[in-house]
Image: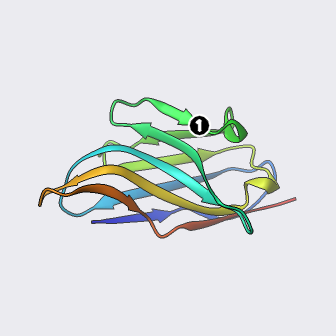
C-alpha cells in the first residue's frame, strides 16, 4: 500500500493550491483520510480530515479557507487551500486511518509529504 501526495509548490499570500493524495495497493476499506502538516521547527499537526461517511473536521487555523473532499474513488482525497498565508508554509502529509488491506491488516499509512511555501 502506498499513499502518493501531489500539488505542493510556491504561491504568494492570498493565493490557492490544491493538494491530492491517492492510496494504491490492495485496499479493502479506509476509515478516514486526512492531511497533516509540519512547519520548520514545529511538531506535526492535523489540518483536515474526512471520514468514509464524508464527515469533515478542520483545524481552527484553516477553517473557512481550506476544503477537504474525497474523489470519486474513495481512496483519493483532495485539499483545496484558498487565501493562503505565510504561516501555512509547511510540509503537508496525507494520512489514511485504519486502512484495511486485502491480506487482513489494519493500520494507518502516511504519504511522503509535499512542500507548500507561501511567500509574503
In this figure, which residue is indicated by the disc labeled 1? 58
**Residue farthest to the right, as pictured:** 120
> Quadrant of the image for the C terminus?
bottom right
Q: Nearer the viewer, residue 50 or 72?
A: 50
Indicate the position of residue 23 as horizontal and vertical percent values: 33, 58
Mark count: 1
The residue located at (47%, 63%) in the rendering is: 5
**Residue farthest to the left, as pictured:** 103
The residue located at (68%, 62%) in the rendering is: 90
> Quadrant of the image for the N terminus?
bottom left
Q: Nearer the viewer, residue 47 or 116?
A: 47
Query: Image check: 31 left or right of 39?
Result: left
Query: Image check: 20 left or right of 81?
Result: left
Indicate the position of residue 75 as horizontal and vertical percent values: 31, 50
Q: Nearer the viewer, residue 50 or 73?
A: 50
**Model colouring:** rainbow
The residue located at (53%, 34%) in the rendering is: 57
In terms of image quadrants, where is residue 82? top right
Under tag 1, what secondary structure? strand
Q: Is residue 101 above or below residue 66?
A: below
Indicate the position of residue 25 as horizontal and vertical percent values: 22, 64
| Mark 1 surroundings: few (<14), some (14-19) or many (≥20) residues within 10 A | some
Indicate the position of residue 12 as horizontal and vertical percent values: 80, 58
Q: Is residue 67 above or below residue 33?
A: above
The residue located at (43%, 57%) in the rendering is: 21
Amino acid at each position: 500500500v502506498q499513499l502518493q501526495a501531489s500539488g505542493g509548490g510556491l504561491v504568494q499570500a492570498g493565493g490557492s493550491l490544491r493538494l491530492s493524495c491517492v492510496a494504491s495497493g490492495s485496499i479493502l476499506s479506509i476509515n478516514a483520510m486526512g492531511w497533516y502538516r509540519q512547519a520548520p521547527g514545529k511538531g506535526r499537526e492535523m489540518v483536515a480530515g474526512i471520514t468514509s461517511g464524508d464527515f469533515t473536521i478542520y483545524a481552527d487555523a484553516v477553517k473557512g479557507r481550506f476544503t477537504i473532499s474525497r474523489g470519486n474513488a474513495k481512496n483519493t482525497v483532495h485539499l483545496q487551500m484558498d487565501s493562503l498565508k505565510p504561516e501555512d508554509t509547511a510540509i503537508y502529509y496525507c494520512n489514511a486511518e485504519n486502512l484495511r488491506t486485502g491480506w487482513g491488516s489494519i493500520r494507518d499509512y502516511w504519504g511522503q509529504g509535499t512542500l507548500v511555501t507561501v511567500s509574503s
